[in-house]
Image (cartoon, coloured by chain):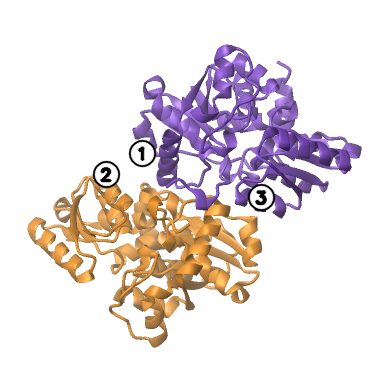
Chain colours: A purple, B orange
Amino acid sequence: MKIKLKDIEAARTRINPFIHRSPVLSSRLLNEISGAELYFKCEGFQKTGSFKARGATNAVLKLDEKLAQKGVATHSSGNHGQALAWAAKKRGIPAYIVMPEDAPAVKVAAVRGYGAELIFCEASLAAREDGLEAVIARTGATFIPPYNHYDIIEGQASAAAELIEDVSNLETIISPVGGGGLLAGTALSAYYLKEDIKVYAAEPAGADDAFRSFHSGELVRSHQPNTIADGLRTTLGPLNFEIIKDLVSDIFLVNDDEIIDAMKLIYQHLKIVIEPSCAVPFAAILKEKDRFKGQRIGLILSGANVDLQKLPF
Amino acid sequence: MKIKLKDIEAARTRINPFIHRSPVLSSRLLNEISGAELYFKCEGFQKTGSFKARGATNAVLKLDEKLAQKGVATHSSGNHGQALAWAAKKRGIPAYIVMPEDAPAVKVAAVRGYGAELIFCEASLAAREDGLEAVIARTGATFIPPYNHYDIIEGQASAAAELIEDVSNLETIISPVGGGGLLAGTALSAYYLKEDIKVYAAEPAGADDAFRSFHSGELVRSHQPNTIADGLRTTLGPLNFEIIKDLVSDIFLVNDDEIIDAMKLIYQHLKIVIEPSCAVPFAAILKEKDRFKGQRIGLILSGANVDLQKLPF
């Protein structure tokens, strides 16, 4: 593995003064419904409202001083942009965020609130990359990618590390997968800290590139996502895929109706706000009840930056 | 005062094995918006999803064994019914809950889930009282009223007691007021535990009987409530009013638009699910910014049993 245990430990030491140790919630009723013991790691309470604050902070703090002063840039459908803007503000350096025009209004407002410069583009990956290239040419800022970067993966690994420390005898962890930053970090933390934990991923059926990559062994490099889980419309990264194919036990697909049902149960019984993307792992557990029956399972609820006007219920 | 400090302490000892010590959350952004330091006591994470579990448990546990075996009964728009059903189940006795036909579906389902017998009636107070009388005549169950009862007030007092212990140097506590159980309990805890805390109440303008009672000195005994805050449509109780008029500093009114705006800010920035009733104190702080500027304020978020299909955004 390119990322070692000591890298994850160093990342945790680096970012801990800035991030929250997010709470782990459980619900008797959700346990009854699923037939398992579920521990929800609630990254919606994290700084900037998602786990992305972890990786972004790690990447920003690792930059040398000279580079840092020119700022950081990225393209993001929202949470990474928000996290990078916030992390840059914490270090006192500029941030340039390229966002698709259809990004949720609440995410756009948050990036603005952290003082970053916003550059809008069309929703395609090509348009985002062009926008990013232009801003980097203009400013000399360093590109901090949303997931396909070891510094990001190291940072995201801290969420599962906390979960493993906070809940004894976990048998399974299940993470959503979009670009693969959270999933790769989760798999690495489990591998180093408690090797017998099985790590699974859950993905929207309408954005199933990680599923197809995992089962074919060949990275699917583009897709046409169509899912309510806006945080998971990104394409799996090659660095992420290398880790995931070695350390992840399986990837499950769930459709949007299953995602919405799971999301509703979490709102009703955990009493917390989550994004649709967050509900994907719980939806997979409900779909695969027999496989998970009776297990102690950690679920990473990745974020809570949802447009309230677009709640699907 | 009829309720002494030792009564509140005894109630806490009695109910603590059954209830949660609910978390206190804060948000940098909500502090900025309000110009004050806000500490939200999140009773939505309480057993049964609201503070009502406190008073109901206290009342159920205080019944002597012979009476208890015949069960308990009440009429409730939802949260008290749910709490009483749950508390009765904990003691292993029957519960009979009279509910208006228009009660939120999620509350009806929860009462059923706790194994109580449900009796539906029209939405008027008179219809509820008739339904209750009939069930008591049939079963011999003891009526546990939603708020106009010292055992209930003693139990509800525990929420503010925890808040005062958990947040140092609070200057103000603000509670919603419907029937007055939570407000009277809050005022008593502040009076006994930290007398210099000012206790305020916030009430929907469309259900302003507590406001009118407080300012006229005469209890308003009925009203025609019209507000989104369904938990606060009840009429202030006489026992509650006696405590409130002595110990509460002021009552503020907010309209439904102000309630919805405050509710939305709490969903967006605290990332938790709350009922409209919960947002009323925060709405009052936003409306009375100058009065509360710079203060350390505890807000009791009373519950999280909301029909997701009826969210006002």
Residue A141: horizontal and vertical position, in percent? 85, 39
Residue A105: horizontal and vertical position, in percent? 61, 51
> Marks 2 and 1: same chain?
no
- Residue drawn at x 36%, y 58% is B10
Residue B58 in view: no
Query: Which circle, 3 or 1, is nearer the viewer?
Result: 3
Height in image: A157 above or below B136? above
Q: How many numbered circles does the render carry?
A: 3
- Label 2's element? helix
Q: Nearer the viewer, residue B55 or A103?
A: A103
> CB of mark 2 within 8 Å of CB of mark 1?
yes
Give the residue type at disc 2. Gly
Label 1 sits on residue: A29
Label 2 sits on residue: B113
Residue A55: horizontal and vertical position, in percent? 70, 34
Label 3 sits on residue: A108
Give the residue type at disc 1. Leu
Q: Residue furthest left?
A: B138
Q: Residue furthest top?
A: A217
